[in-house]
Image (cartoon, grey):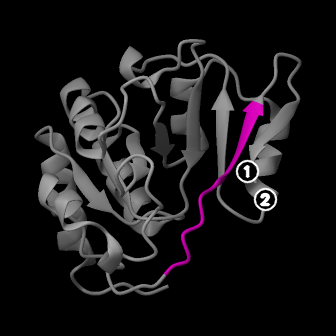
Amino acid sequence: MSYSPFFEDDVNRAVEVLQSGGVILYPTDTIWGIGCKANDIKAISRIYTIKQRYEKKNLIILVDSEEMLRKYVSEVPPVVLELVKTYSKPLTIVYPKARNLPSIIVANDQSIAIRIVNHPFCIEVISRIDVPLVSTSANFSGEPAPASFSTISEDIKNAVDYIAMTDRDKLQKPAASTIIRILPDGNFEILRD
């Protein structure tokens, strides 16, 4: 996949906004997302406000690598790594024991949903800020995910600090990731396919 010569500027601007505590609207390997640094409590609270979403309704985080993943969960069972490598669509995994993350994004049972993202823009931004991105669909809570950038609500667009230029003209069928939960015995269950 080739990106415009503006890709580098787009990434730089997103990183600048995130580093200053901002919220961005950006493309992912599933749908357009609203995000911020996963260690920025004020920005995370702002995302809940933008989405008109209850604060204990969990958000996911995106990481750029297995190495980054291991910083935020206590254990990564081998079966999970095999699934991530072989699964045919994006895979979000609910890990039982989050660590090094603010409580606002960790579930009451201490679990956290994480996806090793597979989108050039996300990977580049995450690697530069060296912190996971909080990610949630670019819609108001309870509404369907937008099919393309052009169908994202103007109110959502106006509420963020930066809107990525990358993939704005790309049509994508709204397709959420598959979600699996790691069980105490190391096996897993599919929560959403």
Residue occupying image coordinates x 78% and y 59%: 87
The correct choice, above or below, for 172 with respect to 124 in the image is: below
- What secondary structure is found at the residue carrying circle 1? helix
In the rendered structure, the answer to whether residue 184 lies left or right of residue 96 reads right
- What secondary structure is found at the residue carrying circle 2? loop
Q: Nearer the viewer, residue 140 or 16?
A: 140
Q: Per the image, is 155 magenta?
A: no
Amino acid found under the numbered disc labelled 1: Val
* Part of the protein shown in magenta: 172-181
Q: Main secondary structure of the magenta part?
A: loop
Mark 1: few, some, or many residues within 10 Å (few <14, many ≥20)? some
In the rendered structure, the answer to whether residue 127 lies left or right of residue 147 reads left
Q: Which mark is residue 190?
A: none
Can you name the residue that lies furthest to the front here?
142
Mark 2: few, some, or many residues within 10 Å (few <14, many ≥20)? few
Q: Which mark is residue 84?
A: 1
The correct choice, above or below, for 118 with respect to 22 in the image is: below
Question: Residue 89 at what x, y percent from top left?
Answer: 70, 63
Question: Residue 137 at what x, y percent from top left?
Answer: 42, 54
Residue occupying image coordinates x 48% and y 21%: 106
Total residue callouts: 2
Q: Is residue 37 visible?
A: yes
Amino acid found under the numbered disc labelled 2: Tyr
The answer to whether mark 1 and mark 2 are in CB contact below 8 A is yes
Question: Residue 138 at what x, y percent from top left?
Answer: 36, 58
Residue occupying image coordinates x 29% and y 40%: 52
**Residue highlighted by disc 2:** 87
Q: Nearer the viewer, residue 165 or 160?
A: 160
Q: Is residue 161 visible?
A: no
Question: Residue 151 at what x, y percent from top left?
Answer: 34, 75
